[in-house]
Image (tube, helix red, strand yellow):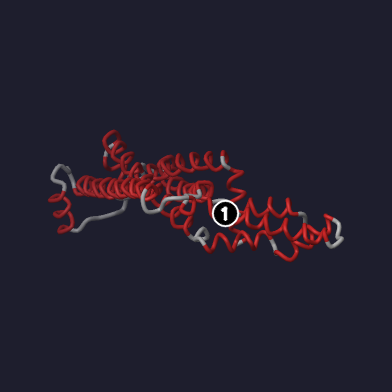
Amino acid sequence: MSIDEFLDVAFAHLAGTGAVGRRALLEAEDHLRQATAAATERGATREQAEADAVAKFGDPVVFARRIGRAHGTGWAPLVTGAWALGAIMAVAVGLAGAVAEILGDTLGPVFVAGDRYGVTYRAWRCAEYLRYAPRGSSCSAAAALHHWGEIVEGRVAVGVLGLLAALLLAVARRTTLKGPTWHVPWPLVATTGAIAFGVAAVVRGLPDGATALLSTTTGTGAGIADGAIAAVFAIGLLAVAAARRNSLLAALSTSAAS
């Protein structure tokens, strides 16, 4: 391996180390070229001198990995990446709650949160539902109103927490978590998120969507809302991952080397 080949490989695996990585690369190049010059003065050919210098210096991937670990680049992006992905998922849950609210307003609470056919209510439970939701004309209607409120409020609360988490991450990146060491690995975040949301869209949306089409719409709205938002986020994150596929390949290569 020549010096230029060593530097190219090391550079590719030092992504995210910033000034620290640049200084390390310059120091490595200086050392290798000095060792090569000394060997050529002793009569070795330049090709052999470079190959010997690189062989003594070590594997460029191992070299880059040591630099990354020494300066926290191995785990820091995992923290910021998980933080960003968690915030995105929480915001998606909040949007699903907003969609469930719209569906309940337009198609009725029973569509979103009604109990499936065959469910019966004991007298004390019926009285509870009517107390919680006095607008309900029956036990089942009151139960649907009550469940609808829980579905919407719970999801919206999670969404608000997601927005706060995203804001906190933005502030942290400008204050305490500054620099390339704490960069958010967006290609990996987008790819992981696209897979997770894709699975959620199938698991949550497909069964209730099929039930609404084939048998009854009662209680299917929540799953349809969750599945629809998950599908939108899956497509959006997949587009981001595709647009940054070169960065993703570099990140995966770095992770594999670590």
Looking at the picture, how far across and down is residue 162, in whole percent? 34, 48
Q: Is residue 49 left or right of residue 112?
A: right
- Dot 1 falls on a residue whose secondary structure is helix
Looking at the picture, how far across and down is residue 153, in whole percent? 25, 47
Residue 114 visible: no
Identify the image quadrant of the C terminus.
Answer: bottom right
Residue 61 visible: yes
Q: Please, is residue 100 above or below residue 49 in the view?
A: above
The residue carrying mark 1 is 21
Query: Disc 1 marks which amino acid?
Result: Gly
Instruction: Between residue 249 and residue 2, name the one nearer to us.
Output: 2
Identify the image quadrant of the N terminus.
Answer: bottom right
Q: Please, is residue 196 above or below residue 54 in the view?
A: above
Q: Which residue: 77% across, 58% down?
A: 36
Q: Residue pushed farthest top?
A: 106
Q: Which residue: 37% across, 53% down?
A: 176
Q: Please, is residue 219 above or below residue 123 in the view?
A: above
